[in-house]
Amino acid sequence: MKEKELVFKLSKSDKSVIIPMLIFMIVTGGISLWLYLSDNGFFIFTLIFFAFITALLIHAVYCICFIKVLIYEDGFLYQPNIFTKRYFDYSEISEAWDTQKHYPNNTVTWCFNFKTVDGQQFSFVCPMNQSDGIDYMLDKINN
């Protein structure tokens, strides 16, 4: 059996956020440790900030690793979480469209929405730099 060739891979988060968040986490952790060792009570606030940054980093890594869409020539694999995975042929999709979400901090994300022949509707959010994959899927489904 021939292995399917991957055309695009879309993930919910952008990989470029990992390194800055990791650096920021190390710096805040170091400051917290230094404040704690010097008996400064302010370490509580920096420790809370460190925990918040750590949680954001774990969430970003989770989104990159497990929430994704793998686009092939004849269909795509939709994985909205670690336990659910479903492959759709383009013929199973009755309609597809894209929308943009604008956030207050002037960021824009693309949303790929699709409806199956049996009426189920799904949506997937991905960063702007991955919009080529959405355009590819829209061309395959709507043409």
Image: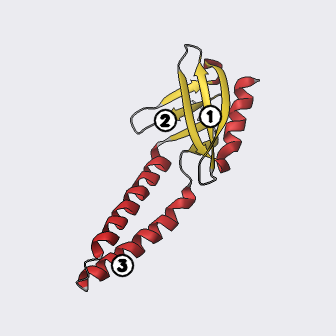
CB atoms of marks 1 and 2 within 8 Å: no
Whole-angstrom CA distance, mark 1 to mark 2, is 14 Å
Measured from the top left, where is residue 39 in percent x and y?
A: 22, 84
Amino acid on which disc 3 is placed: Ile
CB atoms of marks 3 and 2 within 8 Å: no
**Residue underneath mark 1:** 112
Amino acid on which disc 2 is placed: Gln
Judged from the image, the secondary structure of the residue bearing numbered disc 3 is helix
Above or below, 56 against 9 in this view is below
Residue furthest bottom in the image:
38
Residue 73 visible here: no
Q: Quadrant of residue 110?
A: top right
**Residue underneath mark 2:** 79
Which of the numbered marks, if any, corresponds to residue 31? Answer: 3
Judged from the image, the secondary structure of the residue bearing numbered disc 1 is strand
Identify which residue is drawn at 57% across, 25% down: 88
Within 10 Å of disc 1 (Cα), the crowding (few <14, some 14-19, many 20+) is: many
Amino acid on which disc 1 is placed: Phe
Which is closer to the viewer, label 3 or label 2?
3
- Of callouts 3 and 2, which one flags the residue occurring earlier in the amino acid sequence? 3
Which is closer to the viewer, label 1 or label 3?
3
Identify which residue is drawn at 29% across, 78% down: 33
- Of callouts 1 and 2, which one flags the residue occurring earlier in the amino acid sequence? 2
Above or below, 135 against 28 in this view is above
Measured from the top left, where is residue 55 in percent x and y?
A: 37, 57
